[in-house]
Amino acid sequence: MKPRILLALMAASAIAGGTGTATAADVAPYSRSPPVVVPYHSWNGFYIGANIGGAWSNNDALWSPLPASAAFGVFPIAGNTGGSSAIGGFQVGYNWQFAPTWVVGLEGDWSWANAGGSFDQPWVFNPGGGAVPGSFTSMSSRVDWISSLRARLGYLILPNLMAYGTVGGAWGKIDYAASNFAPGAVPYGTGVAFSNTQGGWVAGGGLEWMIINNWLLRGEFLYYSLNDSPSVVVTPVTHSALPSGYSWSNTNVSVVRAALSYKF
């Protein structure tokens, strides 16, 4: 009887061991943690989008009584014709991620604006210093649209967040107007209005966030300097010896805007 009992115990032990091994083999694959998937953000490619924000222009204007202040009998008048407006437009560009944390690109944009202002001041006798009754000089300037072609260099703070700087050429259309009047036995009056498309430069920077692989959202600041100083001389028929000279300085425009782009 003892050999039979011994054989039975050995068989039971073998069956139990086999069952334990199978159970461990079945459970092991399900006890491991799932692999961590790290999202890949590629900045390479063309993109196109739209932007909206605010613009602030700055321009100094001057009325010069000619041929000279003393000969005309009144002092020159100066003022600022800058102002603010909403601004909106579109941008198109290309990004190249040439290193794990560096991106270089080229971007062109065009934006509509209406930033500008005017001043209206009375004439002042030279000499004497008193205001000429009923007289005025009015001057204005207004940025109609602005565009640029810029290079961008960005550093990836995070795989999907880029800080960048940008610089390039700029162009803008500016509308100018001026007029003046003084009553008298023979009233004096002149007026002029014209538009210039001016060139210059732009620089700025911002932050851009890759929401998902195909959508980019940014906030940026751009400073434009349009390097033209227009001036005109207008001679009234009634006072041919006393022309009016109107001149404006370079126009500078500061822009703060948000932009949304789709990357192909």
Image: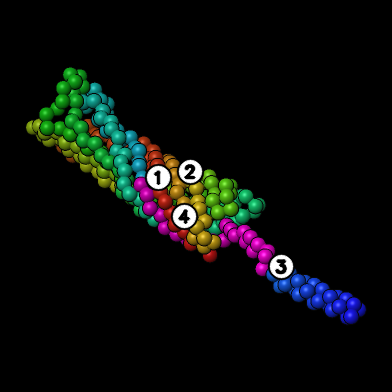
Highlighted magenta segment, given as a residue range = 28-54
* Discs 3, 2 touching: Cβ within 8 Å: no
Q: CA distance from mark 2 to mark 1?
A: 9 Å
Indicate which disc, 2 or 4, sits on the residue closer to the N terminus: 2
Can you give x and y, in whole percent of width and height, for residue 27 in the image?
Answer: 69, 70
Amino acid type for the residue under numbered disc 3: Ala
Residue 217's disc number: 4
Indicate which disc, 3 or 2, sits on the residue closer to the N terminus: 3
Neighbourhood count class around disc 3 (C-alpha, 10 Å): few under 14, some 14–19, many 20 upward: few
Mark 1 sits on what residue? 255
Residue at image location 61% in from the left, 50% down from the top = 102
* Discs 2, 1 touching: Cβ within 8 Å: yes
Q: Based on the displayed image, in which of its 4 quarters is residue 228 positioned?
A: top left
Residue in the foreground of this view, choosing between 15 and 189: 15
Relative to residue 157, is residue 9 drawn left or right? right
Mark 3 sits on what residue? 28
Q: CA distance from mark 3 to mark 1?
A: 61 Å
Look at the picture and state if 97 lies above or below 60. below
SS category of the residue bearing label 2: strand
Q: CA distance from mark 4 to mark 3?
A: 45 Å
Indicate which disc, 1 or 4, sits on the residue closer to the N terminus: 4
* Discs 3, 1 touching: Cβ within 8 Å: no
Q: Is residue 153 visible?
A: no
Indicate which disc, 2 or 1, sits on the residue closer to the N terminus: 2
- Whether the magenta-drawn stretch holds residue 129 is answered as no
The single residue placed furthest to the left in the displayed view is: 185
